[in-house]
Structure formats: structure tokens, C-alpha cells
Amino acid sequence: MVLDAVGIMDILFRFADPKALGVAVEKGLFTKLSDGRTVDVREAAMLLGIEERPARFLLIHCTALGALKCEGGRYRNSSGAEEFLVEGREGNLVGVVSMWNQRLYPAWEQLLEAVQTNHPQTWGESDHFGSIFEDPRRTRLFLEAMHGLSTQSGRALARAFDFSRYPRLLDVGGGSGAYSIELARHFPRLRATVFDLAPAIAVAQEKIAAAGPRIARRVSTLVGDFFKGLPSGFDAFLLSMILHDWTPEEDVRILRNVWNALASGGIVIVSELMMNDDGTGPLSAARMAGNMLVENRGFNYSWQDYERWLRKFGFRKIRRIPLESPAANGVIIGVKP
């Protein structure tokens, strides 16, 4: 990035874009305009239950962002909004936008405090997941957000890696089961088990059932805590967006449990927004590292950090596979000899 005066102003005003998008999602704008509906400013104001001035702002801003199209003074969803910002659409990101708007942006307003104290600023502060899972509304908000992200990233992983040689998958900390569902759709011999705490498993069971009987027959669930141990009998252990939530010491504990449960010839797959080895970015991983700073004790570690931890336990044939997805830019795979 080249930084000049115009660039600085652009950076300072970037907060306005997700806030405008968040408000539009919270008001249900894109869902209400789904399936080809169009509105002018007056009609949008009536549809959203607001006055015309804020309605005009939302329509113009969302059009400038590419979420709406405007023809002859009438606004409609863009193809991207129709696919990702309409409630109920498979793989939508409505939950992601809502969680960022309700949970993360208020925490980012306390970034200076987080930097000065090295302490989280979200609900529960020291007990990140405890604070999420103790409240059903927070649980739903968090897992719906993760489901949208993980659905997209699961599809990217299915395109990047062939699971046909590893038909028994344990989705460690699998949350809503999005990765397991997507991988099962792509690999008809795959049998996946979503392993997580009880509140997450309740949502996973709902999502698996909604995916239909063909998927539900091959994706199961198991309640457990990956800090306390992992079940054996699986060919592959997937850690997707798990290790960035924890300290290096905690990550080593998790990987030790993976090593102990995995049979010879099995693989571990670490899927994350990886930092560059030279500490220069990328911006997506740097942003998520800041998110960990305001949310919990974690960080977005580098490719070589993960490789070093895997080698510590004896994993071999370690390789990097780049991805292009909203929640992961790559996976590291290691084989247990």
C-alpha cells in the first residue's frame, strides 16, 4: 500500500462501509429486496420503517459498495447481495455481518485499551467461549457467523485437497459443522464427525439435519473438549480457525492431543489466515490478529509457526496449500509417521 493524504482519509473512513452494510443487514434491506424487488427512496423508507433521508443514505452507500444496483432511480440487489446478504440462502453471510456489527466493532473501539493492557474487550473478557456459550443469543449469533464463513472456506478446502484417501474425518472444534457438511458434499465416501462443546453441537445437529438425509447419514456429532483429549479412529483431524483463538502454549496442548489420538499414516490439517513468515502481512491475517487482540488470548500465527509446532511432535511431509476464502488463506498438512 502507498500511503498519502488521500489514502489516509480513505483508511479513516473505511469504518463507515461495514457500519452502513451492518445497518442495512440489521434492517433486513437485502432480504426484503430479494428475488428481483426494486424500490425508490420513498418506497425504501416505508419498507424499512425509517424516514427518507436515512433511507436515501443507505441506498446510495450500499450502491457505492456494490451491494445494490440503481437504474432509473430504482434500487435492487446486486448479484453478490442476492447470494450472500439474503437471510436463508445457503452459505449466506448475514450472520457474519450481524456479529461484526453487534460484537466486534464495539470491541475494536477499545483497541487502544487492548493494546495497552493486552486484555480482551468483548463479552466475558478472560473467558471468551464461556461468555459466548452461556447465553443462547450469543451462541446463535456467533455460530451463525462462523457457519457462513466456514461454508465458504469449506468449499475452498474441498477444491484444494483430495480427501478420498482419508474417509474418516474429525472436525475438531467444528462448531456448526459447516466444514464437515461441505466436505461431505464434495466427497461421497467421506464420513465426518463434528467434535465440540455441547452448545455448539446442538446447532451443528440442526445444520446437519437441514443439509438433508444424504449428508446427515455421513456427518455425525460428538460432545467433547479438545483440551481434555480427542477420540481415536480417524484418518484426518481438521483444525479450522481453531488455533488462532489460543496462545502458543495452548495450541501446543491441542496439537499434542491430536498427535496422541491420530494413528500412523493419518494427517492433521490446520486451516487459518496465515501470517507471512517475514512479518509483512497479509492484511487479512493482520486484521484478524487485531480481532484476536480485542476478543481473546489468540493471534494469527505464521506458516512457519505452525510448521515448527507440527515438527515438534514429529509430523512429517509437511506442506503448505494456499486457499482463497473469507476465513482462511491456506492450510498446512502434516502426516504422522
Image (cartoon, rainbow, N blue to C red):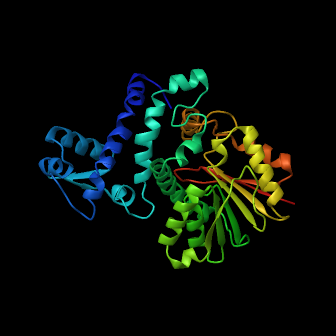
Image vertical order of residue 192 relative to residue 87, above or below: below
Q: Position of residue 206 (x, y in %)?
A: 50, 66
For the image, the number of numbered tags is: 0
The answer, for residue 46, to whether it is visible in the render is: yes
Q: Where is residue 169 in the image (x, y as percent from the top left)?
A: 69, 66
Near-viewer residue (93 or 232): 232
Horizontal arrangement in the rendering, residue 163 relative to residue 201 (left or right): right
Near-viewer residue (187 or 244): 244
Instruction: Tell me where residue 23 sits by quadrant.
Output: top left
Residue at horizontal 55 percent and vertical 74 percent from the top: 215
Residue at horizontal 79 percent and vertical 44 percent from the top: 309
Q: Where is residue 297 in the image (x, y as percent from the top left)?
A: 64, 35
Horizontal arrangement in the rendering, residue 138 relative to residue 298 (left or right): left
Q: Where is residue 97 in the image (x, y as percent from the top left)?
A: 41, 47
Image vertical order of residue 262 relative to residue 105, above or below: below
Residue at horizontal 53 percent and vertical 45 percent from the top: 132
The answer, for residue 175, to whether it is visible in the render is: no
Can you say which quadrant of the picture contains the C terminus? Answer: bottom right
Image vertical order of residue 155 relative to residue 323, above or below: below
Residue at horizontal 23 percent and vertical 45 percent from the top: 59
Image vertical order of residue 305 relative to residue 118, above or below: below
